[in-house]
Image: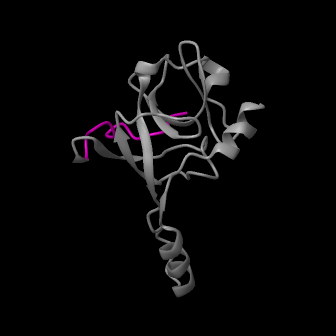
Amino acid sequence: MPELSQETERGRSLLPFLGVAEVTGPSMVPTLQHGDQLVVHWGARVGIGDIVVLRHPFQQDLLVVKRAVERREGGWWVLGDNAFAGGDSTDYGVVPEDLVLGKARLRYRPLRPGQRSPLAAVRWAVSAVRPLFADRSASRRLRAR
């Protein structure tokens, strides 16, 4: 169930408030894939629909990435975009505000070793870097689960 590599938190910092994280696991598919790199804005203000990085409530040395779906008493209700992967607030409840560390601003998808054809390289170049915006339509859809 780990969602981010352990070297993540402020380990490879671009600026004092930005960092790079690597996604592991399937819970945010199709938005994020295993191996994607995220630019994380540590300490950023979180809103509904944002993709956030947080400490797992029961295993606080583990960082996870989820979508902030709803503000509730005591913190944030967070869900993965992949309903079949689990490991979100449906398992551990509301995440306290102090465990939410920041939000993902940008996704970078590295070129895979098998993508050597010119067509594969063009597809990768078009979709490799994408900003991550709050997806309000997804948050409404996910809140209904």
For the C terminus, the quadrant is top right
Span highlighted in magenta in the image:
1-13
Position of residue 41 in the picture relative to residue 135 (left or right):
left
Q: Is residue 84 visible?
A: no
Residue under the image location 61 percent in, 47 percent down: 135
Position of residue 38 in the picture relative to residue 12 (left or right):
right
In which quarter of the view is residue 26 placed? top right
Q: Would you place residue 138 above or below residue 119 in this image? A: above
Q: Residue furthest right?
A: 144
Give x and y (percent) for residue 110: 44, 64
Q: Would you place residue 144 above or below residue 103 in this image? A: above
Give x and y (percent) for residue 93: 61, 17
Give x and y (percent) for residue 19: 31, 45
For the N terminus, the quadrant is top right
Residue under the image location 75 percent in, 39 percent down: 141
In which quarter of the view is residue 140 placed? top right
Give x and y (percent) for residue 64: 48, 34
In which quarter of the view is residue 49 placed? top right
Residue under the image location 52 percent in, 74 percent down: 126
